[in-house]
Image: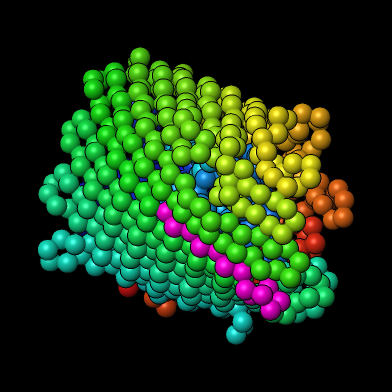
Amino acid sequence: MPSVKAENLKKCEWKNKNGIPCITISKTSNTSVYSSEGVNKVIITKEDIDKSGAKDMSGILELISGFSVYQDGSMGQKTSIFTRGSESNHTLVLLNGISINDQSVTDGLHDFGQDFLKTIQQIEIYKGPSGAHFGPNAIAGAVNIITGIDYKNSMTAGFFDLHNNSLSGNYAKITDNDWHLNLKASTLRNKTNSAKVDGSEKDGTKNYQTNLNIKKWINNNLKFKSTLYSRRTKSDYDDSATKETGYIADNKMHAVQTSLELISKNTEDSVTFHYHNYDRDYEDGGFLDEYESNSFVVKAERKVRFTDKISFGVGSEYKYDWGAFENRGSIFNQSTKGHMKDMGFFANTGFKFSENSILSLYGRSDDHNTTGGNQTYKLNFTQKINKFKFGATHSTGLRNPSLYELYGSNNFGYKGHSGLDPEKSKTNELTGIYNFSDNLSFNLAAYKTTIFDRLEDNGSWTATENKKTDLNQKGLETELLFKGANQSFSIFSNFSKSRNTDGQAQLRRPDLTYGSNYTKRFLNDLFGPLNINLNYKYTGQHVDLDGGRIRMKDTDIINMSLSKDMLGGVFSINISNLLNERYERPATYSEEGRQLRFGFKKVY
């Protein structure tokens, strides 16, 4: 899937009152007009999402170079993302720029298997430490989910059989008094194979998702925005290949977000109020496990173009999290209850030495109620020389302990430790873009990261402690991208290593991945428009656990989608895992084989 580099986005009018469908312009936190050049951001548009045929977030992220996706079975099961070989809890997830990681998860990772795509307008990918932009827990990077207004009213239906189908709708209206209203809703059912290898039953998932977007221009410069987002995912899962019934996960998430944005010739101001709640229940063979967390955020920011050579920005963010859970398993019981609060202040500046040279500086200071004050920063220099653009970046990140690591307990003697220090990282990165022509470009990124003070269980499994061993990561990402009037083609690769200080490879992190993405729109007088989308990804061998360390086989996964404009709508055929590859990722969990889905979309 050819993703879009941020600098290539076409400009949308600030007021866009006519509801012209265009790419959502999202400003990265802690940037200003010139320092925004130092941000390496990849954007996946609504059009990219539709063309891919993917139904959930893991299906999209699987196509991104530098991301390794591990799902505990088929769609709807717990899913972890390893960004550039880092830990699965080192990727921060945001909703319109505000962190939404669930604080009732034991180690703070985000479950991407619960995020489905039909009400999402855009996805932004930030690879590399992003603490200076988004605050704690972005050691490896960040994924920003955008829920902007979609002005194309539509209904979409997809199916394979009675157990595998989906339905979604989008409705937008601009009222007489200039309110922009957009309601999106979707439902999906999926039931294929057992989550566990050698399981005999079929495990399924049901997802329900709604999103209400509201926008109003108070005057020519002041914009009001609000989003209400809700999703619920119910999934069957297996305790083992022999224990398959009575295991159901019910995962609910609700969020409300309201902001004001004021723009003038040389300044941009914004203030955002955000609240979200997670409510998760697990029927576990006759026991009920309950998890709940809440988060409240207030964030304010100002961006200023001071002169034609200098821009700067300042802001602050207050975040309060509280959560509790109780796991009542027959053998393993654990629970926690507590709260965390963090006050962050951030600033940036961009120096435009010439039309082709920009130096950007970013910094953020966070005061956490248990880890105290910690700083992150980022330095970037960007230079353009004719058709070549390169950047050099030094950045840092941190991850604060989760509520369970601070206050949790279990029946085997584990006790949380409120005196833990955060994990920290340092990264050096070189990037380059060479534009052979208006249609052909080559992108490269080389990086090296060290993570310090890792949080791990101690030798007796009775507490979490700061290990003094480091995690070393280094890699080289490349992409050759061609974009024509009716077709695009990309080839990407990622050579990476993630090792402990003793040289041992980290689990579930392949050293090599590569792939290609191809889209083409055929225009034929006889058949009319026909669209084809092909995605291929190779994932190399890697280490996992199944009683001990084992080596997992490599995989070749191909997805294909075809769509045809006819009868006033768009008919589609989506085939995932075209070669019907049978594989486990992670070990002992069976991934979906070939699946064929038919769809129809009507725009009105």
Whether residue 516 can be seen here = no
Q: Nearer the viewer, residue 383 or 455?
A: 455
Q: In which quarter of the view is residue 532 placed?
A: bottom right
Q: Nearer the viewer, residue 195 or 107?
A: 107
Q: Residue 73 placed where, x, y %? A: 70, 65
Identify which residue is drawn at 66% across, 75% down.
Answer: 287
Identify which residue is drawn at 72% across, 59% down.
Answer: 411
Instruction: Find out whether residue 7 is within the magenta segment.
Output: no
Q: Residue 204 placed where, x, y %? A: 64, 76
**Number of numbered callouts drawn:** 0
Asked if 109 appears above or below 252 in the picture, the reply is above
Q: Residue furthest top?
A: 353
Identify which residue is drawn at 23% across, 61% down.
Answer: 180
User: Quadrant of the image for the C terminus?
Assistant: bottom left
Identify which residue is drawn at 54% across, 40% down.
Answer: 400
Whether residue 284 can be seen here = yes
Asked if 270 appears above or below 326 in the picture, the reply is above
Q: Residue 211 placed where, x, y %? A: 38, 65
Task: Find the magenta span and give its range.
Answer: 283-295
Q: State left or right for residue 376 relative to residue 267.
A: right
Q: Residue 51 placed where, x, y %? A: 51, 60
Q: State left or right for residue 308 relative to residue 523.
A: left
Figure coloring: rainbow
Instruction: Find out whether residue 285 is within the magenta segment.
Output: yes
The secondary structure that most of the magenta stretch takes on is strand
Q: Residue furthest bottom?
A: 162
